[in-house]
Amino acid sequence: MQVWAIANQKGGVGKTTSTVSLAGLAAERGQRVLMLDLDPHGSLSSYFRQDPDAVEQSVYTLFEERASLTPARIRSLIRPTGFDNLDLLPSSSALATLERRAVGQDGMGLVVARALAQIYDDYDQVVIDTPPLLGVLMINALAASRQLIIPVQTEFLAIKGLERMVATLQMMSKSRKQGIAYTIVPVMYDRRTQASVSSLLAIRNAHPDNVWPGKVPVDTRFRDASKAGVPPHLYEPGSRGVEAYRSLYKWLQQPAKATSQAAGGIR
């Protein structure tokens, strides 16, 4: 089981789009894929028509029942999306209460990692969508994953969010006692604007060892696919955005990448 977390401490940078796109492309290749929505806002869940305000069985249950979880119970929380090889463990708005409830409770940062370990053989790939803030939910995502993907909008304000994310990794690496492999993915790139071009250059210059050499362009097809509730690669297979994510997925699958990224990553 490969576990990827999609994270950034700035909202609106395409985390959910990246999650659905990469998970969908893995499923297209015959991988058994689980998407896990750790964001209380539940954008990923809403994408697949699961209402985070109404769902009764969700990722929140992992935290509620963490002391008694069994593989069968975890499997009962997972929902099919209606697309081949693609399942979802939906979010609940109740996740927003976890921060205050987690105070003083041991093991709250490892709930997701321990749950995934119980269903290790069920899936080839897990992709985790995260909230845009540092807290128990992001800590769970980082603790469970072996590869972190940081989508960064190519604008200067988004670069500030990237720096906060890197600082978070520095903190997390101390508790893990090992480097965290991460890949920075420039998104929403518009070559027609100087701001986008110069921001991309700034990102590459500041993080030369950890930036994917490509970029994901602005593409309205992502919005259309979301409205339809269909993974982008199925909605518009030949769109510029899908081709960019296809290139990213292939790049992430190269065995040398994980090793080099960890070696050049945060320690």
Image (cartoon, helix red, strand yellow):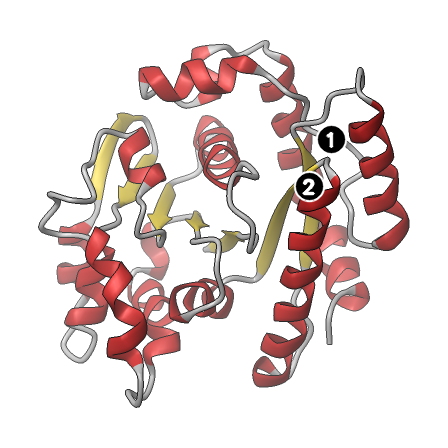
Q: Position of residue 53 (x, y in %)?
A: 16, 44
Q: Mark 2 points at which residue?
A: 185
Q: Which of 12 and 43 is in front in this view?
A: 12
Left or right of 13? Residue 252 is right
Report the front residue among 254 and 79. 79
Q: Is residue 193 left or right of residue 123?
A: right
In the figure, 193 relative to 106: above or below? Answer: above
Q: Quadrant of residue 253?
A: top right
Q: Relative to 266, is 28 above or below?
A: above
Q: Which residue is drawn at 30% across and 60% down?
A: 119
- Decide: few, some or many residues near mark 2? Use Cα within 10 Å; few <14, some 14-19, many ≥20: many
Q: Note whether residue 254 is visible.
A: no
Q: Quadrant of the C terminus?
A: bottom right
Which residue shows up at 62% across the image and 29% down it? 245
Looking at the rendered structure, the secondary structure element under dot 1 is loop
Q: What residue type is labelled 1?
A: Lys
Residue 63 pos. (x, y %): 23, 69
Picture residue at 34% right of the left edge, 33% below the top: 85
Find numbered disc 2 in the image and state the secondary structure of the residue it sits on.
strand
Residue at (68%, 41%) from the top-left corner? 185
The three-letter code of the residue at mark 2 reads Val
Q: Are marks 2 and 1 in contact (CB under 8 Å)?
A: yes
**Residue position for label 1:** 215
Disc with the residue nearer the chain's start (2 vs 1): 2
